[in-house]
Amino acid sequence: MNRFSADIRLRVFLPAILALVAALAACGTDDGPGSGSDGDDSRFVIESTATFSSANLKSLGWKEQKDFVLEYPESIEAKWGFLNTKELGILVYPSAEVAKVQGLQAAKEQTATGEDGQAVGVIDRISCRDAQGQSAVKHRESGGAERDSTVVHVSFQSRPSGDTIEPRVCSNQFPTYTEFRILGNVVLLCEGEGRTGNDPSKNCRDLPDQLQGN
């Protein structure tokens, strides 16, 4: 009778135990390429002896827009623009060695998220979305006119006075850049694909090969 009862208990609780083990294993998996999560950062670094600049990106169609608002120590270029309809930021350093240290730290900070997926810390490029994933922002055109925007990649950093940096009011703030790659002396900060930018970035996937073959 006792053996029969033990068998019943095993059959009842075994699925729950297996589910718990699977859940614990999932908690230790990678959050995605270049997501700023803890782990082996070397997988985001591509060795190259070439020296890159914004000119190399422009030759591939990158449309430069503006300099970043924040300061990036030791960088010689820090800009954002668009490539293949997605925002792409670049940080250029004097050497690959500097990029692996200063650039890696900057890239992780600019893609950092909390448990809810929203931005944490001070991030240069912030996307504001409502609960349905739509953009819920306004931004200024070059001529000064303010209009509603349906574009996710909008900056929410501003300098209202002096060197003070304050984010605009936004209930749901997400990092514009969801992935990064470090190729030699340049850091590529990539907006993801899809309507909300959550899908893997084609720019981060393809640009390293394109730059090295250019």
Image: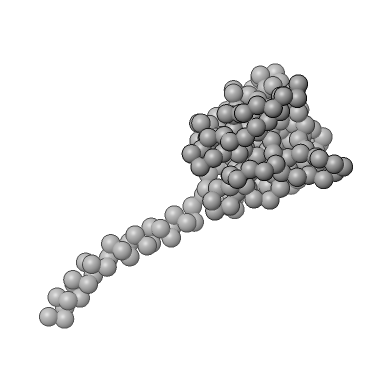
Numbered label tally: 0
Residue 100 in view in this figure: no
Q: Residue at x 76, y 35 (%)?
A: 68
Q: Residue at x 65, y 32 (%)?
A: 138
User: Image quarter for residue 90?
Assistant: top right
Q: Residue at x 82, y 34 (%)?
A: 76
Q: In the rendered view, would you say 193 is above or below 112?
A: above
User: Image quarter for residue 14?
Assistant: bottom left
Q: Residue furthest bottom?
A: 2
Would residue 110 be found to the left or right of residue 32 on screen? right
In percent of width and height, residue 96 lies at: 75, 39
**Frontmost residue, 143 versus 183:** 143
Q: Quadrant of the C terminus?
A: top right
Q: In the rendered view, would you say 145 is above or below 6?
A: above
Q: Residue at x 66, y 46 (%)?
A: 108
Would residue 150 be found to the left or right of residue 75 on screen? left
Q: Residue furthest right?
A: 162
Residue 117 in view in this figure: yes
Would residue 76 be found to the left or right of residue 42 on screen? right
In percent of width and height, residue 44 lies at: 61, 41
In percent of width and height, residue 67 lies at: 77, 31
In percent of width and height, residue 1 lies at: 12, 80
The scheme the figure's colours follow is one colour
